[in-house]
Amino acid sequence: MAVKGNGVSTAQNDVLTGFHELKGGQLALTLAGLMLGIFLSSLDQTIVSTALPSVIASLNGLDRYAWVFTSYMVTSTAGVLVFGKLSDMYGRKWIYIAGVLLFLLGSALSGMSQTMNQLIAFRAFQGIGAGVMMSVSFAIVGDIFPPAKRGKWMGLFSGIFALSSVIGPTVGGYITDNWSWRWVFYVNLPLGAVALAFLVAFMPRVRARGRELPIDYLGVALLLLAVVPMLVGVSLTGLDYGWRSPQVVALLAFSAVALVAFLLVERRAKDPILPLAFFRDRTYSASAVSVFLTSVGMFGAILFIPLFVQGVIGKTATGSGNVLMPLMLGVVAGAALSGQLISRTGRFRAIGVVGIAVAAYGMYLLSRMQVDTGMGVTIRNMVVLGLGLGTTMPLFTIVVQNAFPQRVLGQVTSSVQFFRGVGGAIGSAVFGSIFVGRFHDALLARLPERAAAAVTSGDLSMLNNPESLSTPQAQAALQGQLAQLGLDPSSMQQLFAGVKASIVVAFQEVFVLGLALVAVAWLAAFFLKEIPLRKSNVPEGEGAQAAEQASQPGAGGSSN
């Protein structure tokens, strides 16, 4: 058994039967099925947001509404490493199809929910299927195309992933207004059925040849015990729990203990779920750091730019997708450009360094926005940030796929998705906590003494939710509260000025932190090793003879 320089062993007969030679209709319909899967799984991360008022009116459970998001996010992120490993061991076709079936079943059950607890449980089930689809789809692209030809397709898939996650609120609002909230879930069924038909009929079955090793059950269990409590814990910080609350501290402490145990077990495992040898490869480590930190920055932008636009500029929006459209168009353009450049030049380090530098500049521009910043400047800043972030989305997936043998393609690809998902979850929680705390402190310092006391006591708690004050109904309610407290309703303008100034202070601090994190990602990109992109999916050193053997009938390959 030979050992690659990156610490991953490869057996002499371990050859992947690739199908990047697919042509015409079979290639187009296979890719179409994968794109539909990516679109639906990404869309469902956010499509529920604008439907929630109708959901709550139908099912009650206002105190649990955020878990409709959290349950999906936790299950879709927690299992990606497991699904990637299983796809390496047993082939990607039927693992992916099983994920689509789970997603569609979860969608149907979510639409039929009769209580909020049922909806939360079914969303968690739906998230498992989405995790399979998101983790395995990029590995399948790696099976279809060798690294040298992979860039433009990875760019397209990454653009679909980003765009669909942001148009979700707009789509959800339209469906809820014109049909019902249940169709937010039912709409997945016909689209998913089309994707399923394409994949069953046209996607070949690709599987690594060689000795099957036992599944690392202990590693899987410890990984889930480390990831799930951590994701739930950071999510709780946005559900009226502080970082020092017993619930959050207990979950994070349990997660830390499980993580230590996981690392100890993985060092001795015969075939670990996440080989620690991956991290000895500097390209992998640099990619993991960069993906994690840029994901933190992206989710910070998604969270707070709509708040700035509505709370400071005063624009209204039917959904945050409208506000964020310039950002996402920038992401799509950046992903497409990056993919094309990688495919045409065969180079990636300079593209990564420049792309992250552009993202950092976008963060800097956002951190400089003031109370008098207009919509035109805000759009420009979003486009700059989007271009930079978009550049990184296909790049690091291609980089790690190219750095490792084809037989671990599913593991390394899913690990990139894992770091991206965990970065987004942690970034949302940390940035949200910082924003709320800084906004509250800045607001109390700017309000008249009696108004500040009313905010602190909870009698004027509306001012703690600046986004809700952008509607005429909320402003009228605030006037009523001022009158009841004996405060002069004519001081509304002063109060709103204080709210706007406080949003700006918190917004600037959040994006200064985001700038610092993206700067670290930029430094990490310099450690990428410029390995020539492979022009074949046949493992290096196996040669034409191995490829010919793999293509013979019964060799484990390309039959449906």
Image (cartoon, helix red, strand yellow):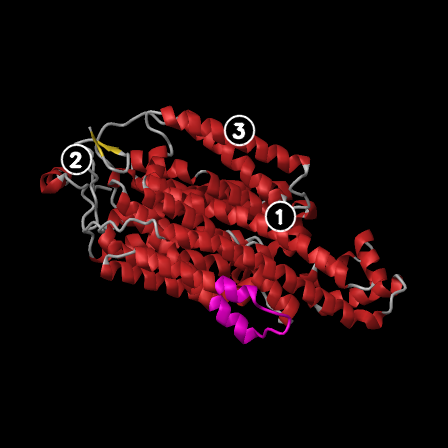
Q: Which residue is mark 1?
A: 66
Q: Which comes before the other along the chain, label 1 or label 3?
A: 1
Question: For the residues marked 1 and 2, what is the alpha-carbon distance in whole angstroms?
Answer: 49 Å
259 and 538: which is toward the camera:
259
Q: Are marks 2 and 3 in contact (CB under 8 Å)?
A: no
Which residue is at a point 42% across and 25% down the rendered structure image? 265
Question: For the residues marked 2 and 3, what is the alpha-carbon distance in whole angstroms?
Answer: 43 Å
Q: Is residue 181 above or below residue 245?
A: below
Question: For the residues marked 1 and 3, what is the alpha-carbon distance in whole angstroms?
Answer: 27 Å
Could you tell whether 114 is left or right of 268 in the image?
right
Q: Which residue is mark 3?
A: 257
Mark 2 lies on a secondary structure that is loop
Q: Which residue is mark 2?
A: 555
Q: Amino acid at mark 2?
A: Ala
How packed mark 1 is, by other alpha carbons closer than 10 Å (few <14, some 14-19, many 20 or more), is some
Q: Which comes before the other along the chain, label 1 or label 2?
A: 1
How packed mark 2 is, by other alpha carbons closer than 10 Å (few <14, some 14-19, many 20 or more), is some
Q: Which residues are magenta?
A: 362-383
Q: Is residue 374 magenta?
A: yes
Q: Position of residue 78 (x, y in %)?
A: 47, 39
Could you tell whether 519 is left or right of 58 in the image?
left
Mark 3 lies on a secondary structure that is helix
Q: Position of residue 6 (x, y in %)?
A: 28, 38
Residue farthest toward the left in the current orientation of the protein: 545
Which residue is at a point 68% across and 52% down the rendered structure image? 437
Q: Quadrant of the N terminus?
A: top left
Numbered badge on residue 89: none
